[in-house]
Amino acid sequence: MAVTLRVPTILRTLTGGESEVPVDGAATLAELLEKVEASYPGLRARVLDDDGKLRRFVNVYVGEEDVRFAGGLQTPTPDGAVVSIIPAVAGG
């Protein structure tokens, strides 16, 4: 069973328009991003900054858990999990 990565509209140009991408064999969020990068170059750079940390205005959830409050990039991604990339929205 794979992990499902939900891709926001703004990043779908990198996934050929796909809104969900199955990822096999990724035990952590870091591994998932590495595997996705191999198939969809450029996606990791939109999620991580130059220091390899989550970008400030990008939220990532494994299930319903915000990875910033879990294990960060070491958050487990068990089989069947849904990982969501959600760009932060600001306004006034």
Image: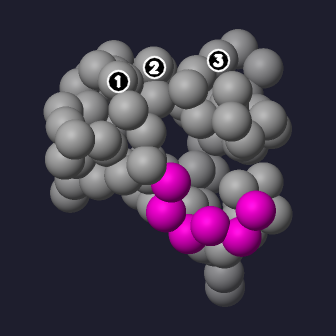
Percent x, y of residue 85: 50, 55
Q: Which mark is residue 52?
A: 3
Rendered residue at 43%/49% (across/down)? 22
**Which of the 4 image quadrants contains residue 33?**
top right
Q: Relative to 81, is 44 above or below? A: above
**Which of the 4 image quadrants contains residue 26?**
top left
**Which of the 4 image quadrants contains residue 12?**
bottom right
Marked residue nearer the N-terminal end (3 or 1): 1
Q: Which residues are magenta?
A: 16-21
Horizontal side, residue 13 vs residue 86: left or right? right
Q: Say whether marks 1 and 2 touch (CB < 8 Å).
A: yes
Rendered residue at 46%/21% (across/down)? 30
Q: How is the image coloured?
A: one colour
**In this view of the protein, can residue 61 be seen by the observer?**
no
Marked residue nearer the N-terminal end (2 or 3): 2
Q: Which residue is mark 2?
A: 31
The mark closer to the camera, 2 or 3, is 2
Q: Say whether marks 3 and 1 touch (CB < 8 Å).
A: no
Graded by Cα atoms within 10 Å as few (under 14), some (14 to 19) or many (20 or more), the crowding at tag 1 reads some
Element type where label 3 sits in the image: loop
Percent x, y of residue 57: 62, 51
Q: Which mark is residue 25?
A: 1
